Amino acid sequence: MPKAKANRVRKSLSLPRFTPDEGTTLAIVADYLNGLEAGERSTLIRELLVMCLLPLAKHHCGHTHSSGT
């Protein structure tokens, strides 16, 4: 069993509530996500945020090399 990291600091992320108009592409995505179980939906959203935004976040924060985290 892996050890828990000592002195681990958790970050909080609040997202806006999305209420897309019926028939839009965002509504299709919202329907898909709402159809998933809560745990599966949270995991998917976390993975998508990292895949899509990590390069931008690293660039914005001045990280120029990949640290594997």
Image (cartoon, grey):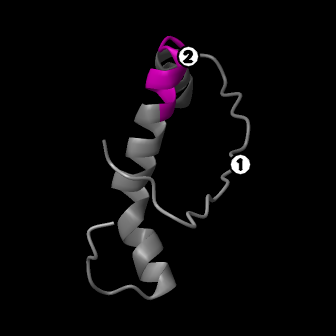
Q: Position of residue 6 (x, y in %)?
A: 51, 64
Q: Residue at x 40, y 44 (%)?
A: 48
Report if residue 37 lies within the magenta region.
Answer: yes
Q: Residue at x 71, y 28 (%)?
A: 19
Q: Main secondary structure of the magenta part?
A: helix
Report if residue 10 lies within the magenta region.
Answer: no
Instruction: Give, as a three-letter code, the residue at label 2.
Output: Asn
Q: Residue at x 55, y 23 (%)?
A: 30
Indicate the quadrant where residue 56 lies: bottom left
Q: Which residue is mark 2?
A: 34
Q: Is residue 28 left or right of residue 19?
A: left
Q: Which residue is mark 1?
A: 14
Q: Quick check: 57 above or below 64?
A: above
Q: Position of residue 53 (x, y in %)?
A: 43, 60
Task: Name the residue nearer the viewer: 39 or 61.
Answer: 39
Q: Position of residue 2 (x, y in %)?
A: 32, 48
Residue at disc 2, secondary structure: helix
Instruction: Give, as a three-letter code, the residue at label 1.
Output: Ser
- The magenta segment is 34-42
Indicate the quadrant where residue 18 lies: top right
Q: Quick check: 63 above or below 12?
A: below
Q: Quick check: 62 above or below 42?
A: below
Task: Name the residue nearer the viewer: 27 or 55.
Answer: 55
Task: Name the residue nearer the viewer: 63 or 9.
Answer: 9
Residue at disc 1, secondary structure: loop
- Mark 2 or 1 closer to N-term? 1
Q: Residue at x 55, y 63 (%)?
A: 8
The quarter of the picture where the N terminus appears is top left
Q: Residues within 10 Å of mark 2 (few under 14, many from 20)?
A: few
